[in-house]
Image (spheres, rainbow, N blue to C red):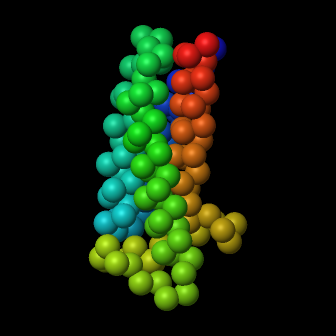
Amino acid sequence: MIRRFLLGCTMVAAIATVGSLYFSEVAGFFPCELCWYQRVLMYPLVPVLGIAAYENYTGVWKMGLPLSVLGIGVAAYHSVIQASPEGVCPVGGGCSAVNWEALGILTIPRLSLGAFVIITVGLVVVAWLDRQ
């Protein structure tokens, strides 16, 4: 059961990683500073969660949860900056620019936020099952 949650979290992290590389390397969108912070928090989750799923290591939530919770914070902050009418990014660069949008509500930071939330929920379930 735990292995399935870990595999699901690994797949979400892998899809988010490939998606971010697609947006920067194929679509040609230059990542802003907040995008880089989100990448720094997402990319290590792929091997960490993947190896934990392979080895059925239930204690991985202690390493993965801090990364995903911090990722939620950065992605939520980035989403707020994009949605604000002033559109001023105190971090620098074009953090307030909307390079890609789908269905009128999805932007790159919101996709990242969704991925971090899904991973966090999955790791909370893993932590709960690990403590049972």
Query: Between residues 126 and 19, which one lies in front from this camera angle?
Result: 126
Q: Residue at x 47, y 65 (%)?
A: 77
Query: Between residues 75 and 43, which one lies in front from this camera angle?
Result: 75
Q: Which x, y percent locates residue 93?
A: 31, 77
The residue most toward the right is 103
Q: Residue at x 55, y 16 (%)?
A: 130
The residue most toward the front is 131
**The image quarter in which residue 101 lies:** bottom right
Name the quadrant of the C terminus. Answer: top right
Query: Between residues 78 and 69, which one lies in front from this camera angle?
Result: 69
Q: Is residue 84 above or below residue 124?
A: below
Query: Between residues 30 and 96, which one lies in front from this camera angle?
Result: 96
Q: Which x, y percent locates residue 88?
A: 41, 84
Q: Is residue 101 above or below residue 66?
A: below
Task: Please indicate, yes or no, whether residue 22 appears anywhere in the rendered image.
Answer: no
Task: Please indicate, yes or no, whether residue 29 appears anywhere in the rendered image.
Answer: yes
Q: Residue at x 46, y 36 (%)?
A: 65
**The image quarter in which residue 122 lies:** top right
Q: Which x, y percent locates residue 83?
A: 56, 77
**The image quarter in which residue 17 lies:** top left
The residue most toward the bottom is 86
Q: Residue at x 46, y 27 (%)?
A: 61
